[in-house]
């Protein structure tokens, strides 16, 4: 029998197959030669054979195996990549505040020979993390100052940041919260008791309609702990939406299991902000993880930090944002890198971010252009930045510049009409 939908009073026949949309085949967004999934890709086979000879396919797709076999020492890392002298010194204890931790999955994407490879620079420490540059601070965004109870940041009127854990499966060397993640500072404790205090704060603060659960990475926790948090927050009547901030789908896509996703979708409206840095992170495994989340009705947005020599040019960003849309992730924010201690080698100028937005806006779909923001040092919050499209006004017109640098005028007069 043909399916129908009711439109006004008419029965409208649907084309055959409508309402039963097939899953988009992975071939549509990755070159066929790379498409070896869910069986192990040759890259992974070779990686396992060399570095984890006792492990098999089942281990590789098990996120707990990924966690327990993460690379945390110079000796382990030195077997996977040819460490430079500087990297070796940093990994051996002369690095910054963050410990070393890289999942085997993400390590399999690193270049063995090239220390400048973007993904390698994101996760392998260098001694520059020890340099203190102008304007840097341990907590430049003053999150501690805006924390009414431990583990909660309440900066904006209607939303809070819930810091659920200090653990990540892979540590990004430019992490805004390097002061508290990775156990670098044991002042930050995460326990159900601390959570309960934070939940009690949300319960007694009716202005809070949006809770962002982040950390650390909340998706590194077991399903039961994530569900405890979600279920406690979901029953608060004034909380309208819950968001999860995570890099897990990118650094440990095996974590996005059908069981996890089935649990998450019980707590809608639930949104997810996924931290992506470079187009090379969009692998078939990551694509499958994101599609699984999207199929569960979770709107996915990407957050990207602008990083010098890693993603600070228009072709790289365009490739990343186009790739994200193909896996159903909407580029959401492009962040100016926060001036945390030891981040000078990662940071570039705000003008560079504006140049990238100028190179995207109008040249590609609006969906592929994130909002460029600087998180104001001192706790001012996110401030959006745009190239100079506004050119001024006179008594009748506003003058605006388009993506081709052509100036147009808009008649900007409030007309009075008699009724
Ligand atoms: S995943 Fe997020 S919280 Fe964890 S190290 Fe990276 S940026 Fe920091």
Image (cartoon, rainbow, N blue to C red):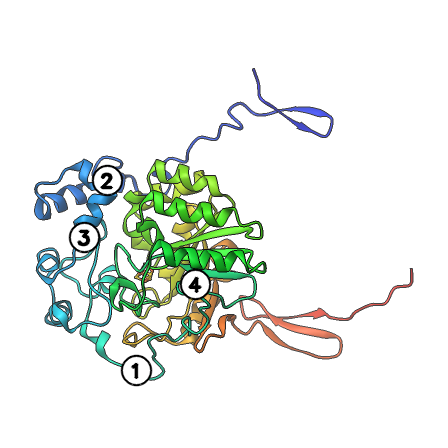
Q: Earlier in the sequence, mark 2 or mark 3?
A: 2
Callout in the foreground (3, 4): 4
What residue is shown with label 4? 152
Residue 249 percent location from the top left of the image? 33, 49
Q: Secondary structure at mark 4?
A: strand
Q: Secondary structure at mark 3?
A: loop
Mark 2 = which residue? 61
| Callout 3: CB less than 8 Å from ligand 1 | no
* Dot 4 and dot 2 residues touching (CB under 8 Å): no
Q: Sequence-wise, which precedes: disc 1 or disc 4? A: 1
Percent position of residue 175, x then y: 32, 66
**Circle 3 residue:** 70
Residue nearest the observer in this picture, 214 or 199: 199
Disc 4 crowd, CA 10 A, few/some/many (<14, 14-19, 20+): many
- Compared to 355, does 55 lie above or below? above
> Can the viewer see residue 363?
no
Q: Are marks 3 and 4 in contact (CB under 8 Å)?
A: no
């Amino acid at each position: 029998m043909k399916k129908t939908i009711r439109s006004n009073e008419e029965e409208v026949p649907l084309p055959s197959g409508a309402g039963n949309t097939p899953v988009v085949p992975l071939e549509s967004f990755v070159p066929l030669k790379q498409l070896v999934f869910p069986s192990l890709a040759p890259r992974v086979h070779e990686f396992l054979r060399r570095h984890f000879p006792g492990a098999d396919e089942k281990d590789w797709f098990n996120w707990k195996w990924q966690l327990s076999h993460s690379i945390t020492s110079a000796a382990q890392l030195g077997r996977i990549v040819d460490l430079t002298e500087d990297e070796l010194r940093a990994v051996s204890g002369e690095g910054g505040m963050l410990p070393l931790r890289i999942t085997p999955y993400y390590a399999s994407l690193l270049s063995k020979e090239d220390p400048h490879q973007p993904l390698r620079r994101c996760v392998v420490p260098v001694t520059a993390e020890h340099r203190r540059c102008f304007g840097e601070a341990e907590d430049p965004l003053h999150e501690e100052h805006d924390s009414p109870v431990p583990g909660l940041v309440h900066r904006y009127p209607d939303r809070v940041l819930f810091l659920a854990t200090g653990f990540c499966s892979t540590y990004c060397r430019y992490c805004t919260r390097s002061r508290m993640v990775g156990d670098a500072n044991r002042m930050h404790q995460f326990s159900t008791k601390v959570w309960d205090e934070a939940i009690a704060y949300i319960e007694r603060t009716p202005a809070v309609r949006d809770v962002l659960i982040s950390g650390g990475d909340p998706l590194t926790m077991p399903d039961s702990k994530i569900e405890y948090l979600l279920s406690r927050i979901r029953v608060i009547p004034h909380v309208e939406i819950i968001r999860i901030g995570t890099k897990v789908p990118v650094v440990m896509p095996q974590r996005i299991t059908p069981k996890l996703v089935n649990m998450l979708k019980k707590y809608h409206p639930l949104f997810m902000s996924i931290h992506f840095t470079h187009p090379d992170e969009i692998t078939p495994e990551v694509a499958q993880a994101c599609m699984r989340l999207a199929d569960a009705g979770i709107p996915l947005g990407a957050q990207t930090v602008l990083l010098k020599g890693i993603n600070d040019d228009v072709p790289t960003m365009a490739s990343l944002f186009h790739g994200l849309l193909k896996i159903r992730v909407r580029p959401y924010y492009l962040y100016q890198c926060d001036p945390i201690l030891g981040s000078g080698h990662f940071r570039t100028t705000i003008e560079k971010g504006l140049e990238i937005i100028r190179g995207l806006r109008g040249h590609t779909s609006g969906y592929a252009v994130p909002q460029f923001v600087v998180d104001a040092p001192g706790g001012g919050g996110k401030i959006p930045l745009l190239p100079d499209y506004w050119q001024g006004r006179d008594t009748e017109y506003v003058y605006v510049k388009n993506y081709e640098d052509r100036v147009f005028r808009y008649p900007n007069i409030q007309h009075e009409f008699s009724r």
